Amino acid sequence: MNFFDRLADRIATVDSVVSVGLDPDPARIPDHLADHDLPRWAFNRRIIDATHEHAAAYKPNAAFYEDPDGWTALRETVAYAHGKDVPVLLDAKRADIGNTARQYADLLDDDDGMGVDAITVNPYLGRDSLEPFLSRADKGVIVLCRTSNPGGADLQGLELETGEPLYERVAAMADLWNGNDNVGLVVGATAPEELEEVREIVPDIPFLVPGVGAQGGDAEAAVEYGLADGVGLVNSSRGIIFAGENQGEGFADAAGQAAKRLKKRLNRYR
Ligand SMILES: O=C(O)c1cc(=O)[nH]c(=O)n1[C@@H]1O[C@H](COP(=O)(O)O)[C@@H](O)[C@H]1O
């Protein structure tokens, strides 16, 4: 089944477009989990138990797992999320020349990869660099378009000879790359005007909208422009998983409450 169809089902089941970002910064994991073999996995498991009723998806960011124990923690996390019927989007922002990209794309494999449902990619190397991802029709390929960070416009906002900014061209190209209906776009909630512009260019492509919560992005714009036919994701990572940072064993309950609050807030605009 196509990723966005699965996501649509999940959104309907939990009545939520919240993506819970699983970015378990080791420096912020509660002390009482430090003795576990895999503290990040212990942390994520408790976060998933507390948040899955409100989660349309989980989005682990690969940066928080790129060491031997990290990969094991990630693999356990993906399997556990799937056990709760929640799709997993690996935020890896990958792409490279075709030969290398084929190796990267193996991360999506169920048996010898991470078995994730979707991945973020960067479009900078062009179509052939994304082909190994795009050709996996059952996996979502979420292309960076206009990122949420302060320097997001440095390159993405550069004007082309046609007068359009680069991120708009990326959106238009993503539409061309969408032969398998598996392409989404990353557009940050910190850039609400750009969100609206990109939505006009690609009315039918779902967005992953990061930047609400810790980055202070616009939740209303995230929902208004992020969803295509009701499908899309609004992500918060630190704002959910570290909501109870100083509450010891209560950290997971606090995360559950934070996920529920974000769901309710976003649902006001759906
Ligand atoms: O691709 C992403 O998910 C992403 C794109 C972007 O433009 N901005 C952005 O913050 N992200 C990711 O979304 C998450 C945001 O985390 P918080 O700021 O803690 O909610 C991090 O994993 C970021 O790497």
Image (cartoon, rainbow, N blue to C red):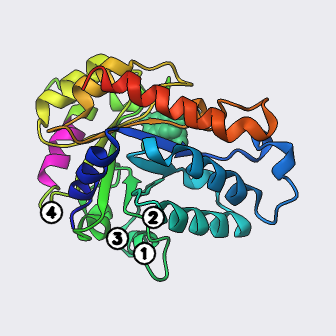
What's under tag 2, amino acid-wise? His
Q: Residues within 10 Å of mark 1 (few under 14, many from 20)?
A: some
Q: Earlier in the sequence, mark 3 or mark 4?
A: 3
Residue at the image position 61 percent from the left and 46 percent from the top: 23
Q: Nearer the viewer, mark 3 or mark 2?
A: 2
Q: Earlier in the sequence, mark 2 or mark 1?
A: 2
For label 3, being within 8 Å of ligand 1 is answered no
Location of residue 210 by image quarter: top left
Q: Secondary structure at mark 2?
A: helix
Q: Which residue is mark 2?
A: 82
Q: Nearer the viewer, mark 3 or mark 4?
A: 4
Mark 3–mark 4 distance (CA, rounded to whole Å): 19 Å
Observer-nearest residue: 212 or 186?
212
Q: Quadrant of the C terminus?
A: top left
Q: Which residue is mark 1?
A: 106
Task: Tell me whether circle 2 and circle 1 mark residues in contact (CB < 8 Å).
Answer: no
Q: Nearer the viewer, mark 4 or mark 2?
A: 2
The magenta stretch is 169-177
Q: Which residue is mark 4?
A: 180
Compared across the picture, whether 247 is left or right of 147 comes to right
Where residue 229 appears, x then y in whole percent? 14, 39
